[in-house]
Amino acid sequence: MSEPVIKCEAVYKIFGVNAKKMLEESNGKVDAKTFQRNGCIVGVNNASFEVSKGEMLVVMGLSGSGKSTLLRCISRLTDATGGKIFIEGQDLLQLKNKELIDLRRNKMGMVFQSFALLPHKTVVENIAFPLQVKGINTEDSISKAMDMVKLVGLDGRENYFPRELSGGQQQRVGIARSLAVEPDIWFLDEPFSALDPLIRKEMQDEFLRLQEKLQKTIMFITHDFDEALKLADRIAIMKDGIIEQLDTPANIVLNPATEYVRKFTEEVPREKVLIIEDVMDAPITENLGELKVSKDEIIENVAQKILTQQKNVSVIDSKNKIVGSINPAKIINTVFGGKENI
């Protein structure tokens, strides 16, 4: 198995004068309330996980849960108080300033909630700017920037200034600027939360299209569970600096690990999130009807067909091979919350 692109081992971020000393004395058992009484705030508490090449890990939680602090530790915009962080096998916390700058310039892309576009530069100039900082000549940087303009669907607006663009268009410029340096690792901190719902949905769709094409290794921060479910390969749910659960969207919805996670998931329309593969049973030969459904279908799209059947339904893969079966009653149990029957 290939080495993870991002690896965190027992990462802590504690704010306060005595943070380092208190962490050492705690032997890794950090109680947020005790630390608070001693003038320290716990931002990240014992985070350990890996992100594979091409994976999108969405970190979510309410405001103050530690998700942005975790991202800042991994990009080393903030130094972790304890633990180890590896980027492609390199120990991030041991890098000297110059090595860190090189890593950020050549390997990492970052997009934040505020677009931070340069108001006196056009769209194409904003996108070309980080390339010019890297020392790429004007002609090549503009050419590359124009490719990015096309990639994010801003053709014809390359000579507009930021003030002439909508919020969604400005966010596209921010994404294009981040992509121009061709990062292997992409950090996005609530990039769509300032947008109105319709534009936000468009940006999510656009983002998924880009990811399908580019296959970046991504950490994406959000407080919106629907957004997390739509975008993530895996989701990490944080509370008070602790990762409560890190799992696939389907497992988080079907098998919440804690009461806190369960509360997050109880309002989720399962039929819109889960696919047939998530709830199918082993293949059977008896009491089978003629209907066959793909294991990759979202339940909502085939529920009506399955519920009209008296018999079990075969589940097939992309090569038409039968890989499972599903009983109509299972769809009802899944959609209406009969988790114990799943």
Image (tube, rainbow, N blue to C red):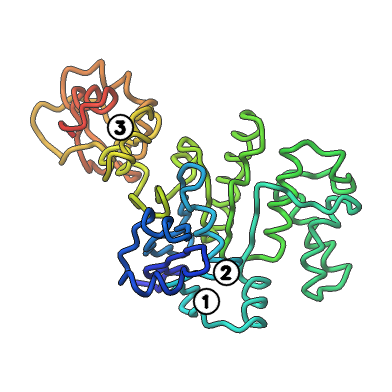
- Where does the image place residue 174, in percent across and percent down from the top left? 72, 51
For discs 1 and 3, the disc positioned in front in the rendered view: 1
Which of the marked residues, 2 or 3, is nearer the chain's N terminus?
2
Residues tagged 1 and 3 counted as in contact (Cβ below 8 A): no
Q: Is residue 9 left or right of residue 178?
A: left
The numbered disc on residue 164 is none
Q: Quadrant of the C terminus?
A: top left
Residues tagged 2 and 1 counted as in contact (Cβ below 8 A): yes
Does residue 235 appear anywhere in the picture? Answer: no
Q: Is residue 330 left or right of residue 10?
A: left
At 20% from the left edge and 40% from the top edge, which residue is drawn? 324
Q: Which residue is mark 2?
A: 76
The numbered disc on residue 293 is 3
* Cα separation between marks 2 and 1: 8 Å
The tally of labels here is: 3
Residue 153, quarter of picture: top right
The numbered disc on residue 92 is 1
Question: In the image, what residue type sits under mark 2?
Answer: Arg
- Where does the image place residue 287, in percent across and percent down from the top left? 10, 26
Q: Secondary structure at mark 2?
A: loop
Instruction: Count residues near mark 3 (Cα–Cα under 10 Å), then give few for <14, some for 14-19, many for 20+.
Output: many
Which of the marked residues, 1 or 3, is nearer the chain's N terminus?
1
Question: In the image, what residue type sits under mark 3?
Answer: Val
